[in-house]
Image (spheres, helix red, strand yellow):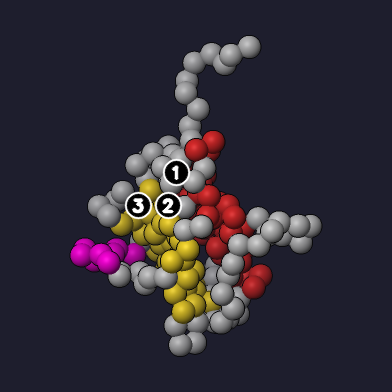
Amino acid sequence: MAVETQSWGEQRAEPVPLTAVCDLDVTGNREVRQRIRDLLSGEAGLLVDDAVLVADELVSNAHRHGAPPRLCRFGLIDQRRSLRIEVDDASSGKPAIRPADATGGRGLLLVDRLASSWGVQQHGHHKTVWAELALDQPGSSGHAPHLAAAPRGPRPS
């Protein structure tokens, strides 16, 4: 599992540009997904889909398990080689991967498989759940090679 704790700018020599900040208590999931798509408009479709799914899972978890105020921030880092997504909420509960069942349990598993890294930063009165996705190529996290783009050409019969 790729869970670690670090803050937005920790271990980074360069400043982190924030492309978007969304107040999740007034901004819908659909708008967050569209803003991720807009930011990654020049990237391959599968990579964009992975980023949208990770953002949607983090935002949905903040709504389902967190408490207001809720914020989402995202931006390109590492000279535009990675996307960083952060979601804050006022709950002190720490997210954890759990076995999937009829009530859920798949969201953080997907985040873990699609993101290059993810983690939780505890603050005084809130937490930040973050994920980073490498933009070099789809499936570059190494966690979900079956999600990498399939080679072009005829399929074996």
Look at 43% across and 57% down and name the residue there: 117
Residue 70 relative to residue 15: left or right: right
Residue pushed farthest right?
Answer: 102
Q: What residue did someone put label 1 on?
A: 142
Q: What residue did someone put label 2 on?
A: 116
Q: Which mark is residue 82?
A: 3
- The amino acid type, in three-letter code, at marker 1 is Gly
Bounds of the magenta segment: 11-18
Precedes in sequence: disc 2 or disc 1: 2
- The amino acid type, in three-letter code, at marker 2 is Ser
Q: Count residues near mark 1 (Cα–Cα under 10 Å), then give few for <14, some for 14-19, many for 20+.
A: some
- The amino acid type, in three-letter code, at marker 3 is Ser
Residue at disc 2, secondary structure: loop
Q: In this orientation, which residue lies closer to the viewer: 54 or 71?
A: 54
Residue at disc 1, secondary structure: loop
Q: Between tags 3 and 1, which lies in front?
A: 1
> Spatial distance from mark 2 to mark 1, Cα to Cα?
8 Å
Residue 56 relative to residue 130: left or right: right
Q: Determine whether label 3 and label 2 are within 8 Å by CB.
A: yes
Vertical placement of 146 versus 24: above or below?
above
Which SS does the magenta portion mostly show?
Answer: loop
50 part of magenta stretch: no
x, y percentage for residue 85? 44, 61
x, y percentage for residue 113? 53, 50
x, y percentage for residue 142? 44, 44
Residue pushed farthest left?
Answer: 13
Residue 25 seen in the current view: no
Residue 116 relative to residue 102: left or right: left
Look at 34% across and 42% down and name the residue there: 136
Precedes in sequence: disc 3 or disc 1: 3
Look at 54% across and 13% down and name the residue there: 154
Q: Count residues near mark 3 (Cα–Cα under 10 Å), then give few for <14, some for 14-19, many for 20+.
A: some
